[in-house]
Image: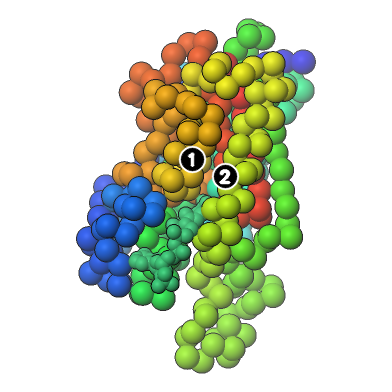
Amino acid sequence: MYQSKIAGVGKYVPENVVTNNDLAEMMDTNDAWIQERTGIKERRHIKDGDGNSTAIMGVKAAKIALERAKVKKDDIDLIVFATLSPDYYFPGCGVQVQEMLDIKTCPALDVRNQCSGFIYGLSTADQFIKTGMYKNILVIGSENHSGGLDFTTRGRSVSVIFGDGAGAVVLTRSDNKEQGILSTHLHSEGKHALELSLKGPSTEHWVPEIIAENPQGDDIPYYPYMNGQFVFKNAVVRFSEVIMEGLKANNLEVKDIDMLIPHQANLRISQFIQQKFKLSNEQVYNNIQKYGNTTAASIPIALCEAWENDKIKAGDKVVLAAFGSGFTWASAVISW
Ligand code: UT7
C-alpha cells in the first residue's frame, strides 16, 4: 500500500464582490438578516464578460496547485472534478480541464456530490494512489452558482447564501507513512434527496415540460430548493458524527485536531460544531463571511487560504468535514 499526500493547494475566486446590500437592491432582503442567519457579509459572482466559467475557474485554481506541488501538467495521471454547476449538462468539467491544461489524454472523472463533492473526490483520488494505480492526481472543486440562482425575492432564502469560486489540490504518492491522507469517511441518505435539490432540467423535468407546467413561472424546478431548517438540523448531527468517525478511526481525540475545516454552509453550523467540541478559534477555519457557500469549492478554498495564512504547519492534524445535498456527508483526516 502506498501513501498519498497533498503536495499543493490553489484557489481562485472571481474579482466581482457582491455585498449583502448589493443583493438588497435586487430582492427583499437585508444585510442584518443575512449576517445574523448565515454569517455571510459578501460573496464573489462571475460577471458577464470576465471570461470565467466553472471549468475555467477550476483550471485557474489547478495551475496554482500544480506550481506549488512542483508537478508538471503531463505528470497528472487523473483529474477529479467536483461540481453541481458544470458548464454543460454533459460532458463534465473534467475533460474541459484536460483540454485547457493541454494534458495528454489522461482520465477525467466528474463527481456529483455537491457540498461533500470535494471530500468524495479526495477520497477517490486517495484510493487510486494507495493502490498504486496513479501517482499524481488533480482534485478540483468549482462552482458557478450565480449563473443559476433566482435573484428575485422568491429565491432569497437560497440565493443570498451561495457564491462562486474554485479550489484545487494535487495529491501525490508519498513514501512517508506518517504524512498525508490518513483516512476518509463517506455517507449518503437518499431519502432526503429533494430537501436540497434542483430538479431540472433533467430527464424527469425537461425544458418544454417545465415551461408547460409553469406558465406563470411559479415554483420553477430549475432553481435550487432548500428546506433550510431541516437541512440545518441534519447538518449539525452528521457533521459531528463524521468528524468523530474520522478521529476514532485514527485513535485521535478532539483535542488532537490542529485545524478543522468544515464545509462553509453557514457560520452558525460551524460555530455549533466548534462549541460542541469545545474547539478554540485557532482550531477552526471559516471564511464564509467573504465567499458565501461555494459548495464543492468551499473546502479547498478554505484549506488553501488557511495554508496561505500559515495556519497549517507540517505534522498538523487537519480534519475536513462536509454535509449537503443528497444528503451526503463526509470527512477526511490528514497529517499535513
Ligand atoms: O451547503 C449545504 C448545506 N446547507 C445548509 O446546511 C444550510 C442549512 N440551513 C440554513 O443555513 C438556514 O436554514 C438558512 C440560512 C437557509 C435560513 O435561515 P433560517 O434561520 O432557517 O430562516 P428561515 O428559513 O426559517 O426563514 C425565517 C424567515 C422567513 O420569514 P417568516 O416566514 O418568518 O416571516 C423567511 O421568509 O426569514 C425569511 N427569509 C428572509 N428574509 C430576509 C428567508 N430568506 C430571507 C432573506 N432575507 N434572504
* Residue designated by label 1: 272
Left or right of 78 in this view: 232: left
Q: Residue at x 44, y 29 (%)?
A: 284
Taking 293 as reference, is 184 above or below it? Answer: above
Location of residue 329 by image quarter:
top right
Residue 61's tag is: none
Residue 281 % position (x, y): 39, 27
Q: Is residue 273 something one can see in this rendering?
A: yes
Q: Classify mark 2: helix, strand or loop.
A: helix
Where's residue 54, x and y in %? Answer: 46, 51
Q: Residue at x 64, y 65 (%)?
A: 194
Residue 4 in percent (x, y) is at 64, 19
Q: Earlier in the sequence, mark 1 or mark 2?
A: 2
| Quarter in which the N terminus is drawn | top right
Q: Where is residue 92 drawn, in percent x and y?
A: 59, 53
Residue 236's disc is 2
Taking the spot 62% from the left edge, 85% from the top edge, the residue there is: 209
Q: CA distance from mark 1 to mark 2?
A: 7 Å
- The type of residue carrying mark 2 is Val
Q: Amino acid at mark 1?
A: Phe
- The residue under the point 48% across, 48% down is 265
Would you place residue 121 above or below residue 132 in this image? below
Colour scheme of the rendered structure: rainbow
Looking at the image, which is closer to me, 11 or 245? 245
State if disc 2 and disc 1 touch (CB < 8 Å): yes
Residue 88 in which image quadrant? bottom right
Q: Secondary structure at mark 1?
A: helix
Eyeballing the image, is 288 above or below 334? Answer: below
- Badge 2: few (under 14), some or many (20 or more) residues near its Cα, within 10 Å? some
Question: In the figure, 265 relative to 85: above or below?
Answer: above
